[in-house]
Image (cartoon, grey):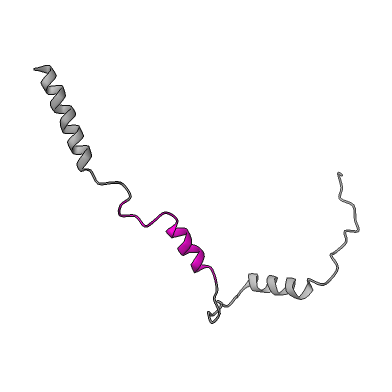
Amino acid sequence: MFRSQILLAVATTVLITGCASSPGDDLPPHGASLRHTMAAQVYRPGDEAPPMTGDKAVSVMEYYRNRGAAPSVMTSEIPGI
């Protein structure tokens, strides 16, 4: 009796496992989300670039205009070094 219950439990488990769907069947192929993200971040000819506003735009333009200037030289010593 006990042996037949174990065999029935094992057979039921095997049948249920065989009927289960494969995990990930409903997901896109591996790496598709990464390729989509990379494609969304690339500008192609004809695409409009978003305008820059605010402090970030000011700092970028100042750097661009002064990038040929010599770097500032520190003239005073730092205390404690």
Residue 27 position by quadrant: bottom left
Q: Nearer the viewer, residue 12 or 78?
A: 12
Q: Nearer the viewer, residue 81 or 31?
A: 31
User: What is the magenta range?
Assistant: 25-42
The reply to whether the magenta stretch includes residue 29 is yes
* 22, above or below 10, in the image: below
The reply to whether the magenta stretch includes residue 2 is no
Q: Nearer the viewer, residue 34 or 70?
A: 34
Residue drawn at (53%, 67%) of the image: 41
Q: How many marks?
A: 0
Residue drawn at (69%, 71%) of the image: 60
* 16, above or below 63, in the image: above
* 16, above or below 55, in the image: above
Residue furthest to the bottom in view is 46
Report the quarter where the C terminus lies.
top right
* 17, above or below 30, in the image: above
Residue drawn at (47%, 62%) of the image: 35
Query: Residue 39 in the image: x percent, y percent?
Result: 50, 67
Query: Residue 57 in the image: x percent, y percent?
Result: 65, 73
Report the quarter where the N terminus lies.
top left
Residue drawn at (48%, 63%) of the image: 37
Taking 75 as reference, is 30 left or right?
Answer: left
Taking 34 as reference, is 56 left or right?
Answer: right
Taking 72 as reference, is 63 left or right?
Answer: left
Query: Residue 54 in the image: x percent, y percent?
Result: 61, 73
Query: Residue 71 in the image: x percent, y percent?
Result: 84, 65
